[in-house]
Amino acid sequence: MADAIEIRSITKTFPGVTALSDVSFSIHAGEVHAVVGENGAGKSTLMKILGGVYQADRGEIVIDGAVAHLRSVQEAVAHRISVIYQEFNLMPELTVAENIFVADLPTRRFLPLLRMKALRERTRELIDRLSLDLSPSALVKNLSVPRRQMVEIAKALHLDASIIIMDEPTAALAGAEVDKLYQIIRTLKSQGKTILYISHRLKEIFDVADRVTVLRDGRFIATEEVSGLTQDAVVRMMVGRDVTHFYPHAPASEGALPAAAALSVHELTREGAFERVSFSVNKGEILGIAGLMGSGREELLKALYGLVPCDSGEIRVGGRPVRIANPQDAIRLGIGFVTEDRKDSGIFPLMSVKENVSLNVIRRLTRAAGTYIDIRRERALLAEYTRFLNLRFASESQQVMYLSGGNQQKIVLSRALAAECGILLLLEPTRGIDVGAKAEIYQLLGELSRKGIALVIVSSDLPELIAVSSRVLVVWQGRITGELRGADIEENTIMQCATGSRQLTRGER
Protein backbone atom coordinates (compact mmCIF):
# COMPACT_ATOMS: atom_id res chain seq x y z
CA MET A 1 0.00 0.00 0.00
CA ALA A 2 1.35 3.43 -0.96
CA ASP A 3 2.20 5.93 1.75
CA ALA A 4 0.31 9.21 1.91
CA ILE A 5 2.76 10.64 4.48
CA GLU A 6 6.26 9.73 5.58
CA ILE A 7 7.58 11.37 8.74
CA ARG A 8 11.37 11.25 8.71
CA SER A 9 13.50 11.99 11.79
CA ILE A 10 11.34 14.90 12.98
CA THR A 11 12.75 16.81 15.97
CA LYS A 12 11.13 19.83 17.64
CA THR A 13 12.19 21.66 20.80
CA PHE A 14 10.65 24.45 22.85
CA PRO A 15 12.36 26.39 25.66
CA GLY A 16 13.31 23.78 28.23
CA VAL A 17 11.36 20.98 26.50
CA THR A 18 12.10 18.51 23.70
CA ALA A 19 8.64 17.83 22.27
CA LEU A 20 9.75 15.44 19.51
CA SER A 21 13.04 13.59 19.16
CA ASP A 22 13.96 11.84 15.88
CA VAL A 23 10.42 10.59 15.19
CA SER A 24 9.89 8.49 12.04
CA PHE A 25 6.89 6.51 10.77
CA SER A 26 4.55 6.38 7.78
CA ILE A 27 0.81 6.63 7.14
CA HIS A 28 -0.75 4.57 4.36
CA ALA A 29 -3.02 6.28 1.83
CA GLY A 30 -6.70 5.70 2.57
CA GLU A 31 -6.25 4.38 6.11
CA VAL A 32 -7.40 5.63 9.51
CA HIS A 33 -4.12 5.89 11.42
CA ALA A 34 -4.30 6.55 15.16
CA VAL A 35 -1.54 8.33 17.08
CA VAL A 36 -1.57 7.82 20.85
CA GLY A 37 0.57 8.66 23.86
CA GLU A 38 0.47 10.31 27.25
CA ASN A 39 0.16 14.08 27.60
CA GLY A 40 3.48 15.58 26.56
CA ALA A 41 4.27 12.65 24.27
CA GLY A 42 4.39 15.01 21.28
CA LYS A 43 1.18 14.07 19.46
CA SER A 44 -0.31 17.54 19.12
CA THR A 45 3.09 19.06 18.32
CA LEU A 46 3.49 16.60 15.44
CA MET A 47 0.00 17.38 14.15
CA LYS A 48 0.77 21.12 14.25
CA ILE A 49 3.92 20.49 12.22
CA LEU A 50 1.84 18.64 9.64
CA GLY A 51 -0.69 21.49 9.72
CA GLY A 52 1.97 24.15 9.13
CA VAL A 53 1.53 25.81 12.54
CA TYR A 54 5.00 24.75 13.76
CA GLN A 55 8.13 24.04 11.76
CA ALA A 56 10.37 21.13 12.69
CA ASP A 57 13.94 21.88 13.83
CA ARG A 58 15.19 18.82 11.94
CA GLY A 59 13.76 16.13 9.69
CA GLU A 60 11.35 16.21 6.78
CA ILE A 61 7.77 15.42 5.78
CA VAL A 62 7.15 13.48 2.56
CA ILE A 63 3.66 13.68 1.04
CA ASP A 64 2.76 11.42 -1.88
CA GLY A 65 6.43 10.67 -2.47
CA ALA A 66 7.72 14.26 -2.55
CA VAL A 67 9.29 16.33 0.24
CA ALA A 68 6.76 18.92 1.43
CA HIS A 69 7.77 22.27 2.90
CA LEU A 70 4.98 23.07 5.35
CA ARG A 71 6.07 26.52 6.50
CA SER A 72 2.55 27.87 7.03
CA VAL A 73 -1.06 26.81 7.36
CA GLN A 74 -1.60 27.97 3.78
CA GLU A 75 1.13 25.63 2.51
CA ALA A 76 -0.43 22.74 4.44
CA VAL A 77 -3.82 23.53 2.84
CA ALA A 78 -2.10 23.64 -0.56
CA HIS A 79 -0.95 20.07 0.10
CA ARG A 80 -4.62 19.23 0.84
CA ILE A 81 -4.11 18.81 4.58
CA SER A 82 -6.98 19.79 6.87
CA VAL A 83 -6.75 19.81 10.68
CA ILE A 84 -9.39 19.57 13.41
CA TYR A 85 -7.50 20.85 16.44
CA GLN A 86 -8.06 19.79 20.04
CA GLU A 87 -8.34 23.43 21.11
CA PHE A 88 -10.95 25.50 19.31
CA ASN A 89 -9.81 28.08 16.76
CA LEU A 90 -13.10 29.88 16.29
CA MET A 91 -14.15 33.54 16.26
CA PRO A 92 -16.91 33.81 18.87
CA GLU A 93 -18.44 37.03 17.55
CA LEU A 94 -19.00 35.53 14.08
CA THR A 95 -21.74 33.15 12.98
CA VAL A 96 -21.40 29.42 12.37
CA ALA A 97 -21.44 30.07 8.62
CA GLU A 98 -18.78 32.79 8.79
CA ASN A 99 -16.49 30.60 10.91
CA ILE A 100 -16.79 27.59 8.60
CA PHE A 101 -16.09 29.55 5.39
CA VAL A 102 -13.82 32.25 6.82
CA ALA A 103 -11.00 31.39 4.38
CA ASP A 104 -13.19 31.55 1.26
CA LEU A 105 -16.24 33.70 1.93
CA PRO A 106 -18.46 34.14 -1.16
CA THR A 107 -18.29 37.76 -2.34
CA ARG A 108 -19.84 39.70 -5.19
CA ARG A 109 -18.03 39.68 -8.49
CA PHE A 110 -16.90 43.28 -8.66
CA LEU A 111 -17.43 44.48 -5.09
CA PRO A 112 -15.90 43.17 -1.83
CA LEU A 113 -19.37 42.53 -0.37
CA LEU A 114 -20.40 39.30 1.26
CA ARG A 115 -23.12 37.26 -0.48
CA MET A 116 -25.04 36.30 2.65
CA LYS A 117 -27.64 34.15 0.91
CA ALA A 118 -24.94 32.11 -0.85
CA LEU A 119 -23.04 31.75 2.42
CA ARG A 120 -26.09 30.45 4.27
CA GLU A 121 -26.93 28.04 1.43
CA ARG A 122 -23.40 26.63 1.29
CA THR A 123 -23.37 26.23 5.06
CA ARG A 124 -26.78 24.56 5.15
CA GLU A 125 -25.71 22.15 2.40
CA LEU A 126 -22.57 21.17 4.34
CA ILE A 127 -24.42 20.85 7.66
CA ASP A 128 -27.11 18.68 6.08
CA ARG A 129 -24.50 16.51 4.35
CA LEU A 130 -22.76 15.93 7.68
CA SER A 131 -26.09 15.61 9.57
CA LEU A 132 -25.01 18.19 12.15
CA ASP A 133 -27.36 19.96 14.56
CA LEU A 134 -26.26 23.52 13.82
CA SER A 135 -27.86 26.77 12.68
CA PRO A 136 -25.79 28.70 10.08
CA SER A 137 -26.82 32.06 11.60
CA ALA A 138 -26.07 31.21 15.25
CA LEU A 139 -23.25 33.16 16.90
CA VAL A 140 -20.45 30.84 18.00
CA LYS A 141 -20.21 32.58 21.40
CA ASN A 142 -23.73 31.36 22.18
CA LEU A 143 -23.01 27.72 21.36
CA SER A 144 -22.25 24.98 23.87
CA VAL A 145 -18.80 23.40 23.81
CA PRO A 146 -20.05 20.26 21.96
CA ARG A 147 -21.65 22.39 19.24
CA ARG A 148 -18.45 24.42 18.89
CA GLN A 149 -16.66 21.13 18.32
CA MET A 150 -19.13 20.37 15.53
CA VAL A 151 -18.33 23.76 13.96
CA GLU A 152 -14.62 22.88 14.06
CA ILE A 153 -15.35 19.56 12.34
CA ALA A 154 -17.44 21.23 9.63
CA LYS A 155 -14.81 23.95 9.18
CA ALA A 156 -12.11 21.36 8.52
CA LEU A 157 -14.21 19.10 6.31
CA HIS A 158 -15.56 21.74 3.94
CA LEU A 159 -12.13 21.89 2.30
CA ASP A 160 -11.41 19.27 -0.37
CA ALA A 161 -8.60 17.72 1.70
CA SER A 162 -7.06 14.33 1.00
CA ILE A 163 -5.38 14.15 4.45
CA ILE A 164 -7.54 14.95 7.47
CA ILE A 165 -6.01 15.24 10.95
CA MET A 166 -8.38 14.86 13.90
CA ASP A 167 -6.85 15.88 17.23
CA GLU A 168 -9.19 14.71 20.03
CA PRO A 169 -12.31 15.27 17.87
CA THR A 170 -14.68 13.61 20.37
CA ALA A 171 -13.35 15.27 23.53
CA ALA A 172 -16.47 17.43 23.85
CA LEU A 173 -18.97 15.02 22.28
CA ALA A 174 -21.48 12.63 23.86
CA GLY A 175 -22.50 9.18 22.60
CA ALA A 176 -24.84 10.14 19.75
CA GLU A 177 -22.43 12.79 18.45
CA VAL A 178 -19.52 10.32 18.60
CA ASP A 179 -21.53 7.84 16.51
CA LYS A 180 -22.19 10.62 14.01
CA LEU A 181 -18.47 11.35 13.78
CA TYR A 182 -17.79 7.63 13.21
CA GLN A 183 -20.20 7.74 10.27
CA ILE A 184 -18.36 10.74 8.84
CA ILE A 185 -15.02 8.94 9.22
CA ARG A 186 -16.33 5.82 7.46
CA THR A 187 -17.65 7.98 4.61
CA LEU A 188 -14.33 9.81 4.25
CA LYS A 189 -12.39 6.54 4.25
CA SER A 190 -14.68 5.12 1.53
CA GLN A 191 -13.78 8.20 -0.54
CA GLY A 192 -10.06 7.36 -0.26
CA LYS A 193 -9.23 10.04 2.33
CA THR A 194 -6.34 9.49 4.74
CA ILE A 195 -7.18 10.21 8.38
CA LEU A 196 -4.82 10.73 11.33
CA TYR A 197 -6.81 10.24 14.49
CA ILE A 198 -5.64 11.26 17.98
CA SER A 199 -7.67 10.28 21.02
CA HIS A 200 -7.15 9.47 24.69
CA ARG A 201 -10.28 7.31 24.56
CA LEU A 202 -8.71 4.00 23.62
CA LYS A 203 -12.04 2.41 22.72
CA GLU A 204 -12.29 4.85 19.82
CA ILE A 205 -8.93 3.69 18.47
CA PHE A 206 -10.27 0.15 18.26
CA ASP A 207 -13.57 1.38 16.82
CA VAL A 208 -12.19 3.38 13.89
CA ALA A 209 -8.44 2.87 13.29
CA ASP A 210 -6.57 0.45 11.01
CA ARG A 211 -3.14 1.03 12.54
CA VAL A 212 -1.83 2.84 15.60
CA THR A 213 1.45 4.62 16.30
CA VAL A 214 2.56 5.06 19.90
CA LEU A 215 4.71 8.00 21.05
CA ARG A 216 6.27 8.31 24.50
CA ASP A 217 8.21 11.31 25.83
CA GLY A 218 8.56 12.69 22.31
CA ARG A 219 9.97 9.46 20.85
CA PHE A 220 8.57 6.85 18.46
CA ILE A 221 7.77 3.56 20.22
CA ALA A 222 5.91 1.40 17.67
CA THR A 223 3.42 1.21 14.81
CA GLU A 224 1.09 -1.81 14.91
CA GLU A 225 -2.07 -3.16 13.30
CA VAL A 226 -4.96 -2.44 15.65
CA SER A 227 -6.44 -5.88 14.98
CA GLY A 228 -3.45 -7.51 16.68
CA LEU A 229 -3.54 -5.43 19.87
CA THR A 230 -5.49 -5.12 23.10
CA GLN A 231 -6.17 -1.93 25.04
CA ASP A 232 -3.84 -3.14 27.80
CA ALA A 233 -1.04 -3.62 25.28
CA VAL A 234 -1.49 -0.09 23.94
CA VAL A 235 -1.47 1.34 27.47
CA ARG A 236 1.78 -0.51 28.29
CA MET A 237 3.44 0.95 25.20
CA MET A 238 2.15 4.44 26.03
CA VAL A 239 3.26 4.60 29.65
CA GLY A 240 6.02 1.97 29.76
CA ARG A 241 4.27 0.12 32.58
CA ASP A 242 0.98 -1.53 33.54
CA VAL A 243 -1.72 0.87 34.70
CA THR A 244 -3.41 -1.14 37.43
CA HIS A 245 -6.56 -0.14 39.28
CA PHE A 246 -7.58 2.13 36.39
CA TYR A 247 -10.79 3.04 38.21
CA PRO A 248 -11.19 3.29 42.00
CA HIS A 249 -11.87 -0.07 43.68
CA ALA A 250 -15.45 1.02 44.25
CA PRO A 251 -17.30 4.32 43.96
CA ALA A 252 -18.20 6.07 47.16
CA SER A 253 -21.61 4.91 48.34
CA GLU A 254 -24.32 7.08 49.81
CA GLY A 255 -23.81 5.29 53.09
CA ALA A 256 -20.04 5.82 53.17
CA LEU A 257 -20.47 8.80 55.49
CA PRO A 258 -23.37 9.88 57.70
CA ALA A 259 -26.07 11.27 55.42
CA ALA A 260 -25.59 15.01 55.31
CA ALA A 261 -26.54 17.03 52.26
CA ALA A 262 -23.62 19.24 51.30
CA LEU A 263 -25.58 20.71 48.38
CA SER A 264 -29.25 20.56 47.48
CA VAL A 265 -31.38 22.28 44.87
CA HIS A 266 -35.16 22.54 44.68
CA GLU A 267 -37.21 23.37 41.58
CA LEU A 268 -34.22 25.10 39.97
CA THR A 269 -35.11 26.61 36.60
CA ARG A 270 -33.29 28.49 33.87
CA GLU A 271 -35.51 29.19 30.89
CA GLY A 272 -34.33 27.39 27.76
CA ALA A 273 -31.79 25.26 29.64
CA PHE A 274 -33.32 23.29 32.52
CA GLU A 275 -36.65 23.25 34.34
CA ARG A 276 -37.70 22.41 37.93
CA VAL A 277 -34.59 20.41 38.73
CA SER A 278 -34.34 19.02 42.26
CA PHE A 279 -31.61 16.86 43.77
CA SER A 280 -29.08 16.71 46.58
CA VAL A 281 -25.55 15.42 46.99
CA ASN A 282 -24.19 14.26 50.33
CA LYS A 283 -20.78 14.79 51.85
CA GLY A 284 -18.44 12.16 50.46
CA GLU A 285 -20.75 11.22 47.60
CA ILE A 286 -19.79 11.18 43.91
CA LEU A 287 -22.89 12.18 41.93
CA GLY A 288 -22.68 11.71 38.17
CA ILE A 289 -24.83 13.65 35.70
CA ALA A 290 -25.38 12.20 32.22
CA GLY A 291 -27.18 13.56 29.18
CA LEU A 292 -26.83 14.23 25.49
CA MET A 293 -25.56 17.45 23.95
CA GLY A 294 -28.03 20.26 24.61
CA SER A 295 -29.75 18.47 27.49
CA GLY A 296 -28.97 21.26 29.97
CA ARG A 297 -26.45 19.33 32.08
CA GLU A 298 -23.59 21.82 31.53
CA GLU A 299 -25.79 24.84 32.19
CA LEU A 300 -26.95 23.26 35.45
CA LEU A 301 -23.41 23.03 36.85
CA LYS A 302 -22.57 26.52 35.62
CA ALA A 303 -25.64 27.87 37.41
CA LEU A 304 -24.49 26.25 40.66
CA TYR A 305 -21.17 28.08 40.31
CA GLY A 306 -22.77 31.43 39.47
CA LEU A 307 -21.63 31.50 35.86
CA VAL A 308 -25.20 31.77 34.54
CA PRO A 309 -28.28 33.04 36.43
CA CYS A 310 -31.33 31.01 37.40
CA ASP A 311 -34.89 32.26 36.95
CA SER A 312 -36.34 30.48 39.99
CA GLY A 313 -35.71 27.77 42.55
CA GLU A 314 -33.64 27.35 45.67
CA ILE A 315 -30.02 26.33 46.36
CA ARG A 316 -28.92 25.16 49.79
CA VAL A 317 -25.34 24.63 51.00
CA GLY A 318 -25.03 22.67 54.24
CA GLY A 319 -28.80 22.97 54.70
CA ARG A 320 -28.77 26.77 54.53
CA PRO A 321 -30.44 28.70 51.66
CA VAL A 322 -27.85 30.66 49.68
CA ARG A 323 -27.69 33.05 46.77
CA ILE A 324 -24.98 32.40 44.18
CA ALA A 325 -24.84 35.37 41.82
CA ASN A 326 -21.25 34.89 40.66
CA PRO A 327 -18.22 32.59 41.08
CA GLN A 328 -16.93 34.69 44.00
CA ASP A 329 -20.10 33.79 45.93
CA ALA A 330 -19.56 30.12 45.11
CA ILE A 331 -15.91 30.15 46.23
CA ARG A 332 -16.85 31.82 49.54
CA LEU A 333 -19.41 29.05 50.06
CA GLY A 334 -16.75 26.38 49.53
CA ILE A 335 -17.77 25.41 45.98
CA GLY A 336 -15.03 24.62 43.45
CA PHE A 337 -15.46 24.30 39.70
CA VAL A 338 -13.49 22.63 36.90
CA THR A 339 -14.48 23.81 33.43
CA GLU A 340 -14.62 21.64 30.33
CA ASP A 341 -13.19 24.47 28.19
CA ARG A 342 -9.77 25.03 29.70
CA LYS A 343 -8.51 27.22 26.84
CA ASP A 344 -11.23 29.88 26.95
CA SER A 345 -12.39 29.76 30.57
CA GLY A 346 -9.96 27.62 32.58
CA ILE A 347 -6.34 28.66 32.28
CA PHE A 348 -4.66 32.07 32.20
CA PRO A 349 -2.33 31.25 29.30
CA LEU A 350 0.16 34.09 29.73
CA MET A 351 0.53 33.58 33.48
CA SER A 352 2.95 31.13 35.04
CA VAL A 353 2.22 27.65 36.35
CA LYS A 354 2.68 28.91 39.91
CA GLU A 355 0.34 31.88 39.44
CA ASN A 356 -2.38 29.74 37.82
CA VAL A 357 -2.46 27.35 40.77
CA SER A 358 -2.49 30.01 43.50
CA LEU A 359 -4.85 32.53 41.90
CA ASN A 360 -7.99 31.65 43.88
CA VAL A 361 -6.16 31.77 47.24
CA ILE A 362 -3.82 34.67 46.64
CA ARG A 363 -5.13 36.60 49.68
CA ARG A 364 -4.33 33.62 51.89
CA LEU A 365 -0.72 33.73 50.66
CA THR A 366 -0.11 37.41 51.35
CA ARG A 367 1.81 38.99 54.23
CA ALA A 368 2.02 42.44 55.81
CA ALA A 369 -1.69 43.24 55.49
CA GLY A 370 -1.78 42.02 51.91
CA THR A 371 1.06 44.17 50.59
CA TYR A 372 3.09 41.31 49.14
CA ILE A 373 2.82 37.60 48.31
CA ASP A 374 4.75 35.08 50.37
CA ILE A 375 6.62 33.37 47.53
CA ARG A 376 7.77 30.54 49.76
CA ARG A 377 4.21 29.60 50.66
CA GLU A 378 3.14 29.97 47.02
CA ARG A 379 5.92 27.59 45.95
CA ALA A 380 4.94 25.13 48.69
CA LEU A 381 1.36 25.16 47.39
CA LEU A 382 2.57 24.42 43.84
CA ALA A 383 4.84 21.63 45.13
CA GLU A 384 1.91 20.05 46.99
CA TYR A 385 -0.29 19.85 43.89
CA THR A 386 2.61 18.91 41.63
CA ARG A 387 2.99 15.78 43.75
CA PHE A 388 -0.74 15.26 44.18
CA LEU A 389 -1.60 15.44 40.46
CA ASN A 390 1.76 14.53 38.92
CA LEU A 391 2.01 17.88 37.12
CA ARG A 392 4.67 18.19 34.42
CA PHE A 393 6.29 21.52 33.60
CA ALA A 394 9.76 22.90 32.90
CA SER A 395 9.77 25.49 35.70
CA GLU A 396 7.36 27.26 38.04
CA SER A 397 7.62 30.37 35.86
CA GLN A 398 6.74 28.56 32.62
CA GLN A 399 3.67 30.05 30.93
CA VAL A 400 0.72 27.65 31.08
CA MET A 401 0.04 28.08 27.35
CA TYR A 402 3.13 25.93 26.67
CA LEU A 403 1.92 22.95 28.73
CA SER A 404 0.16 19.96 27.19
CA GLY A 405 -3.63 19.97 27.27
CA GLY A 406 -3.76 17.38 30.03
CA ASN A 407 -1.40 19.32 32.26
CA GLN A 408 -3.44 22.47 31.66
CA GLN A 409 -6.52 20.56 32.84
CA LYS A 410 -4.65 19.45 35.96
CA ILE A 411 -3.73 23.08 36.65
CA VAL A 412 -7.44 24.02 36.60
CA LEU A 413 -8.19 21.15 39.00
CA SER A 414 -5.31 22.19 41.28
CA ARG A 415 -6.64 25.74 41.51
CA ALA A 416 -10.10 24.51 42.57
CA LEU A 417 -8.66 22.16 45.20
CA ALA A 418 -6.27 24.80 46.55
CA ALA A 419 -9.30 26.80 47.74
CA GLU A 420 -10.14 23.89 50.09
CA CYS A 421 -13.63 23.46 48.72
CA GLY A 422 -16.19 21.15 50.33
CA ILE A 423 -18.19 20.81 47.10
CA LEU A 424 -16.48 20.23 43.76
CA LEU A 425 -18.30 20.59 40.42
CA LEU A 426 -16.52 19.01 37.46
CA LEU A 427 -17.41 19.39 33.77
CA GLU A 428 -15.71 16.69 31.68
CA PRO A 429 -12.86 16.31 34.23
CA THR A 430 -10.70 14.03 32.05
CA ARG A 431 -11.27 15.70 28.70
CA GLY A 432 -7.97 15.62 26.79
CA ILE A 433 -6.16 13.66 29.51
CA ASP A 434 -4.16 10.50 28.78
CA VAL A 435 -4.85 7.09 30.29
CA GLY A 436 -2.11 7.31 32.92
CA ALA A 437 -3.34 10.69 34.15
CA LYS A 438 -6.95 9.48 34.02
CA ALA A 439 -6.12 6.63 36.38
CA GLU A 440 -4.51 9.13 38.76
CA ILE A 441 -7.51 11.46 38.64
CA TYR A 442 -9.98 8.62 39.23
CA GLN A 443 -8.00 7.62 42.31
CA LEU A 444 -7.95 11.27 43.37
CA LEU A 445 -11.75 11.52 43.06
CA GLY A 446 -12.11 8.48 45.30
CA GLU A 447 -9.70 9.99 47.82
CA LEU A 448 -11.55 13.33 47.83
CA SER A 449 -14.86 11.57 48.45
CA ARG A 450 -13.38 9.66 51.38
CA LYS A 451 -12.32 13.01 52.85
CA GLY A 452 -15.95 14.09 52.79
CA ILE A 453 -15.92 16.34 49.72
CA ALA A 454 -19.14 16.19 47.71
CA LEU A 455 -18.41 15.76 44.01
CA VAL A 456 -20.78 16.41 41.09
CA ILE A 457 -19.43 15.19 37.75
CA VAL A 458 -20.78 15.80 34.24
CA SER A 459 -19.10 13.47 31.75
CA SER A 460 -19.77 12.30 28.19
CA ASP A 461 -17.63 9.22 28.87
CA LEU A 462 -20.25 6.77 30.13
CA PRO A 463 -17.82 4.04 31.30
CA GLU A 464 -16.06 6.72 33.33
CA LEU A 465 -19.30 8.01 34.82
CA ILE A 466 -20.53 4.51 35.64
CA ALA A 467 -17.24 3.53 37.28
CA VAL A 468 -16.75 6.53 39.57
CA SER A 469 -20.32 7.48 40.53
CA SER A 470 -22.33 6.21 43.47
CA ARG A 471 -25.48 7.67 41.89
CA VAL A 472 -26.25 9.01 38.42
CA LEU A 473 -28.81 11.62 37.40
CA VAL A 474 -29.84 11.62 33.73
CA VAL A 475 -31.04 14.83 32.08
CA TRP A 476 -33.20 15.05 28.95
CA GLN A 477 -34.45 18.36 27.56
CA GLY A 478 -33.66 20.12 30.83
CA ARG A 479 -35.51 17.66 33.07
CA ILE A 480 -34.26 14.80 35.22
CA THR A 481 -35.55 11.57 33.67
CA GLY A 482 -33.40 9.15 35.64
CA GLU A 483 -32.01 8.83 39.14
CA LEU A 484 -29.99 5.62 38.96
CA ARG A 485 -28.37 3.50 41.64
CA GLY A 486 -26.71 0.13 41.84
CA ALA A 487 -27.46 -2.22 38.94
CA ASP A 488 -29.43 0.50 37.13
CA ILE A 489 -26.22 2.43 36.51
CA GLU A 490 -25.39 0.92 33.11
CA GLU A 491 -25.12 2.29 29.57
CA ASN A 492 -28.43 1.06 28.13
CA THR A 493 -30.51 2.44 30.99
CA ILE A 494 -28.64 5.75 30.93
CA MET A 495 -29.16 6.13 27.17
CA GLN A 496 -32.88 5.25 27.44
CA CYS A 497 -33.32 8.01 30.02
CA ALA A 498 -31.06 10.41 28.06
CA THR A 499 -33.21 10.06 24.94
CA GLY A 500 -36.53 10.43 26.79
CA SER A 501 -37.68 6.89 26.02
CA ARG A 502 -37.74 5.93 29.70
CA GLN A 503 -38.09 7.62 33.07
CA LEU A 504 -36.54 6.06 36.15
CA THR A 505 -36.59 8.13 39.30
CA ARG A 506 -36.50 7.45 43.05
CA GLY A 507 -40.11 6.29 43.12
CA GLU A 508 -39.87 3.93 40.12
CA ARG A 509 -38.01 0.67 40.70
Image (cartoon, rainbow, N blue to C red):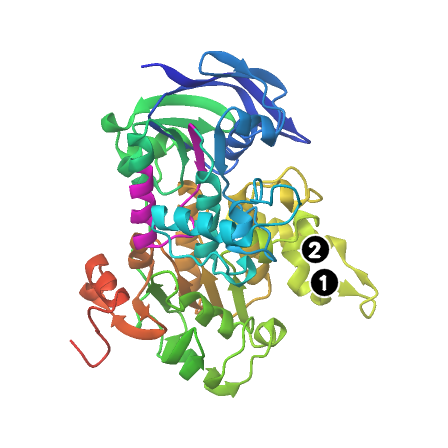
Residues at marks 1 and 2, CA–CA distance in whole angstroms: 7 Å
Query: Mark 2 belongs to which amino acid?
Result: Glu
Q: Is residue 388 visible?
A: no
Residue 72 painted magenta? no
The stretch in magenta equals: 162-185
- Establish if 94 lies above or below 184: below
Q: Is residue 382 visible?
A: yes
- Establish if 304 lies above or below 66: below
Residue 173 painted magenta? yes
Query: Mark 1 belongs to which amino acid?
Result: Leu
What SS does tag 2 mark? helix
Q: As rendered, which of 39 and 495 lies closer to the eye?
A: 495
Q: Residues within 10 Å of mark 1 (few under 14, many from 20)?
A: some
Q: As rendered, which of 288 and 130 lies closer to the eye?
A: 130
- Residue 46 x %, y %: 52, 28
Circle 2 residue:
378
Kindly identify the residue that appears in the image at 63 percent across and 20 percent down.
57
Circle 1 residue:
365
- Establish if 370 lies above or below 207: below
